[in-house]
Amino acid sequence: MNASYRYLAVGALVLGLLALFVRNPKEFHQVSVDVQELARTIEREDDHITVDELASMLMEGNHRLRILDLRDSASYAQYHIPAAERIGITQLMDERLLPGDTTVLYSDGGIHAAQAWMLLAAKGHKNVYTLRGGLNEWNDEVVFPHGGQHLRREEKAKLSMRAKFFGGELIDRQRSVGRPPTNRPAPLQKKLQKEVEKTREVC
């Protein structure tokens, strides 16, 4: 785990516990939180998945995957990860999370999602993860990855194929800024979106 993410996780741990207390001080004594276990989970990096892992799960058609976007409605409408649902943290606290689902939380950079993960972990929810680096890393590494000279042809081809799957493209390393993502998905991505939504309706 890099240093910046470690500080982010520790900060989220503290803020999450404070938020848990502030939300309803009268009920705080009813919540049993094993802070040491939560700290070990973060140290083992078991609290998050990477953008590569999430992209693979989506491309492989994992239908027991639930992706929750914690940003505001306007940001969600502008762009969101395929099959993601927009939800606020307050609403999330009352949301029914199925034990058999893998739930992934994300925000722009990650700290908002890390705070939400902390609250859900304190409530005893399992199989919940944050997306490391948030939507920023998803855009940089998956939708508009940079292809430098150090990459082999096979690696570039793989990155390009994945980017196209999610409606993006491989960006030349010399270009400093890629095109902003939109919600106009590629054909395969659109099919994936429909399949996931259909599965969610059945569940």
Image: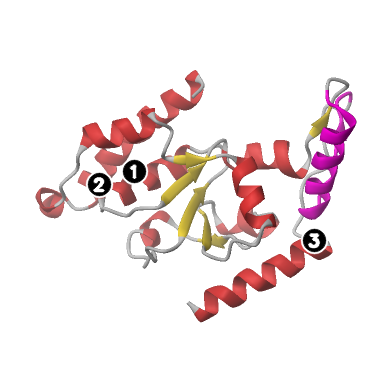
Real-space Cα separation, disc 2 to disc 3, in angstroms: 38 Å
Picture residue at 37% right of the left edge, 63% below the top: 99
**Which label was assigned to residue 154?**
none
Residue under numbered circle 2: 20
Residue under numbered circle 1: 118
The extreme bottom residue here reads: 202
Picture residue at 34% right of the left edge, 43% below the top: 118
- The quarter of the displayed image where residue 153 is located: top right
Residue under numbered circle 3: 184
Amino acid found under the numbered disc labelled 1? Met
Real-space Cα separation, disc 1 to disc 2, in angstroms: 9 Å
Q: Nearer the viewer, mark 1 or mark 2?
A: 1
Secondary structure type for disc 1? helix
What's drawn in magenta, residue-wise?
Answer: 151-174
Q: Earlier in the sequence, mark 2 or mark 3?
A: 2
Image coordinates of residue 157 in percent, x first then y, are 87, 40
Picture residue at 41% right of the left edge, 64% below the top: 100
